Image (tube, coloured by chain):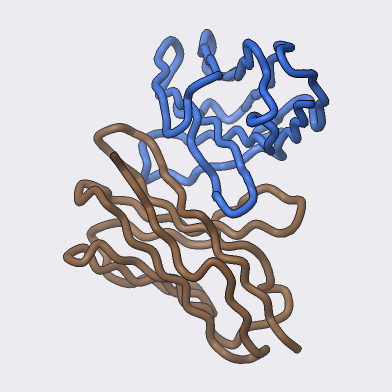
Amino acid sequence: GENVEQHPSTLSVQEGDSAVIKCTYSDSASNYFPWYKQELGKRPQLIIDIRSNVGEKKDQRIAVTLNKTAKHFSLHITETQPEDSAVYFCAAGYSSASKIIFGSGTRLSIRP
Amino acid sequence: NAGVTQTPKFQVLKTGQSMTLQCAQDMNHEYMSWYRQDPGMGLRLIHYSVGAGITDQGEVPNGYNVSRSTTEDFPLRLLSAAPSQTSVYFCASRPGGPGETQYFGPGTRLLVL
């Protein structure tokens, strides 16, 4: 069945440095890859997404890249700030079944 | 718009009890889903619906039932609660297929003793 693997499970970076979170997916028919940020006690919120006809997308300090051949996609956060501390989830949309499957999450901590 | 709403916010059940978690959205979204969130396991899809009268199973459907009689509401039923169902439950909705932004409700924290 469909599966999304996410690494690492925890990540600690110095403020101002970059953070990279990687995901792989199992079904080559996947065509939509959103990233969500979840702060403690809050609901997940979409921060960026990419569709399969695009290789890279940027929004200020956040970028996502997609390699469909390898079935990999990654989240890049540059110039990290304390407010970037949260749990980040990748996900893959499976159009044939109309469902979105999530990775297990990455807890990102920004050290001052 | 209220967006996606969930009730209750918190619930304690005894093993074997039944209950319904409510989810409603006022954005006229066709697609709705239920996820459970457990530490270290991310968000796992329980059931989803692509429109009124249409539901399907996700990754972890056992022990849960759903129905979709209207576009707005998508309740999740626990017929006989078990301690393994202790979790935070999120309802989500989106306008159409996977390419549309999915919005989450505030969550329901469930404790089964």
- At x 76% / y 89%, what residue is drawn? A112
* Position in image of residue A91 (x %, y %): 43, 52
Q: Position of residue A4 (x, y in %)?
A: 38, 53
Residue B110 in the figure: left or right of residue A54:
right
Rendered colour, chain B: blue
Q: Chain A's colour?
A: brown
Quadrant (top left, top right, bottom left, bottom right) of the N terminus of chain B: top right
Image quadrant in which you'd find residue A11? bottom right
Residue B30 falls in which quadrant of the image? top left
B36 vs A2, left or right, is right
Task: Give A32 or B96, whichever is nearer the viewer.
Answer: A32
Looking at the picture, does residue A82 appear above or below residue B70?
below
- A111 w.r.t. B24: above or below: below
Percent position of residue B80, x then y: 65, 12
Say which residue appears at 53% left-offset and 81% top-offset.
Answer: A19
**Residue B81, horizontal then vertical, whole percent:** 68, 18
Task: Identify which residue is drawn at 63% across, 16% down.
Answer: B78
Quadrant of residue B34 in the image? top right
Judge whether B20 appears above or below B58 on screen.
Answer: above
Residue B53 or residue B95, whichever sits in front: B53
Q: Which residue shows up at 39% across the image and 70% down it?
A: A74
